[in-house]
Image (spheres, helix red, strand yellow):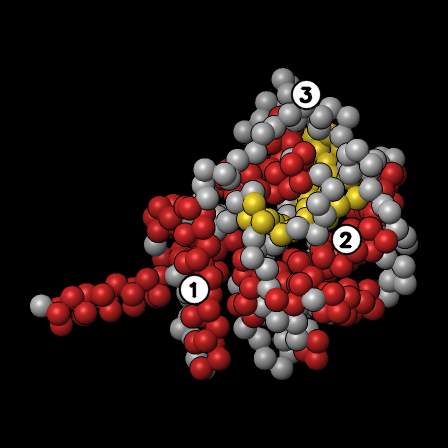
């Protein structure tokens, strides 16, 4: 009997591993096996947290008709539901996406723009192209005198190896570097919007995957060795290190802007298209959050009065989450922030130039 139970347990664990791998292929080296097991552990822990804290994973919407929000990637997944909530707050929402027409149509399917007090504008943006980021930021500057909320939401996960037109690995530039540049360019408008009573906010949509990340300064593009899991976790750790140090910079300037990073939860979206979970779609729908549920923590970070003045936070399920040890070390955050500035040749971050 014990042997039968042990065999059944082994088969169940093997199946769970097979269908939840970060990629459709099996790990080939010991390092890849170790990385995969770390992802499995982090994923399981996050799913348990999502279930445990589901009662506090809530956001109260309220009318804010004079506020302007900018979001990247708001045409599907949690981004689409974030836009829905911001419009319900009667905000002016600018969505930066690759295909503005398709985004407009997707949003109109869930929001009646004729009856909402919010205003929607969809603009072209490929956050994986630094040229596109600069053009998008210039368009925002030409149309608005302030930006109250910037939500850096667009992202990719576990994608095949690709070097972009700017010479950077795709996860690094799409998830982090493009948004880092956008923050730099729009920071003057954010500073113009913030007050001591109500700060402007930057929200970086990150992931619990940052916990297994490491910054490979000598090979940031993974040219010598590439793993989709490593590339993704590196980009997500980059976001949180950048969040932490940028808040220090803003505090030193007495700027009324706060920066928050969030883990939206393990959410059933197209982000998992490159993972093994696509083999069993019901698995994601059964255990993962819906996009609407995944949108709650990012919106909480963007508008909740409960965290007013508490910049530099990392939130999960609308509460403080556990962070990578490097995030708690000021020198680690500063080193990476300056590294990113050097890559983009930024001499004074936030100057908008």
Horizontal placement of 271 versus 74: left or right? left
Q: Residue furthest top?
A: 115
Q: Secondary structure at mark 2?
A: helix
296 is higher (above) or lower (below) than 29: above
For the C terminus, which image quadrant? bottom right
Q: Which residue lies under the disc numbered 3?
A: 117
Name which quarter of the figure residue 36 lies in.
Answer: bottom left
**What's the distance in space between the residues labelled 3 and 1, CA to CA?**
44 Å
Name which quarter of the figure residue 256 lies in.
Answer: top right
For the N terminus, which image quadrant? bottom left
> Which comes before the other along the chain, label 3 or label 1?
1
Q: Nearer the viewer, residue 249 or 126?
A: 249
The reply to whether the C-beta atoms of the residues labelled 2 and 3 are less than 8 Å apart is no
Q: Position of residue 298 (x, y in %)?
A: 61, 43
> Which comes before the other along the chain, label 2 or label 1?
1
181 is higher (above) or lower (below) than 307: below
Q: Which residue lies under the disc numbered 1?
A: 41
Q: Secondary structure at mark 1?
A: helix
Horizontal placement of 289 versus 257: left or right? left
Q: Nearer the viewer, residue 104 or 322?
A: 322
Mark 2 vs mark 1: give the one in front. 2
Note whether residue 58 is visible: yes
Q: Residues within 10 Å of mark 2 (few under 14, many from 20)?
A: many
Q: Residue at x 62, y 52 (%)?
A: 314
Q: Residue at x 63, y 17 (%)?
A: 115
183 is higher (above) or lower (below) than 25: above
Q: Position of residue 289 (x, y in %)?
A: 45, 44
Q: Which mark is residue 247?
A: 2
Name which quarter of the figure residue 249 lies in.
Answer: bottom right
Q: Residues within 10 Å of mark 3 (few under 14, many from 20)?
A: some
């Amino acid at each position: 009997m014990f042997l039968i139970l042990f065999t059944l347990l082994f088969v169940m664990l093997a199946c769970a591993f097979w269908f939840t791998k970060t990629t459709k292929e099996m790990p080939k080296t010991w390092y890849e096996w170790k990385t995969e097991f770390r992802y499995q552990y982090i994923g399981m822990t996050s799913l348990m947290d999502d279930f445990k804290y589901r009662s506090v994973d809530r956001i109260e919407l309220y009318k804010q008709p004079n506020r302007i929000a900018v979001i990247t990637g708001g045409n599907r997944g949690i981004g689409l539901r974030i836009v829905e909530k911001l419009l319900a707050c009667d905000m002016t929402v600018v969505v930066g996406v690759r295909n503005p027409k398709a985004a407009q149509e997707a949003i109109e399917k869930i929001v009646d723009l004729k009856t909402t007090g919010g205003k929607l504008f969809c603009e072209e943006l490929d956050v994986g192209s630094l040229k596109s980021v600069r053009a998008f930021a210039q368009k925002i500057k030409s149309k608005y005198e302030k930006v109250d909320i910037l939500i850096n939401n667009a992202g990719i996960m576990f994608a095949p190896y690709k070097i972009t037109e700017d010479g950077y690995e795709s996860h690094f530039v799409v998830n982090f570097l493009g948004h880092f540049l956008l923050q730099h360019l729009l920071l003057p408008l954010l500073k113009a919007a913030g007050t001591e009573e109500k700060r402007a906010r930057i929200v970086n949509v990150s992931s619990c995957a940052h916990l297994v990340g490491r910054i490979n300064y000598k090979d940031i593009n993974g040219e010598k060795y590439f793993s989709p899991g490593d590339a993704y976790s590196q980009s997500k750790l980059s976001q949180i290190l950048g969040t932490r140090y940028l808040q220090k910079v803003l505090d030193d300037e007495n700027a009324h802007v706060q920066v928050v990073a969030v883990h939206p939860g393990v959410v059933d979206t197209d982000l998992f298209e490159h993972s093994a979970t696509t083999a069993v779609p019901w698995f994601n729908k059964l255990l993962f959050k819906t996009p609407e549920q995944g949108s709650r923590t990012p919106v909480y970070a963007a508008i909740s009065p409960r965290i007013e003045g508490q910049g530099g936070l990392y939130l999960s399920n609308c509460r403080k989450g556990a962070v990578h040890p490097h995030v708690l070390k000021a020198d680690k955050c500063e080193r990476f922030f300056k590294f990113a500035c050097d890559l983009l040749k930024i001499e004074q971050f936030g100057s908008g130039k």
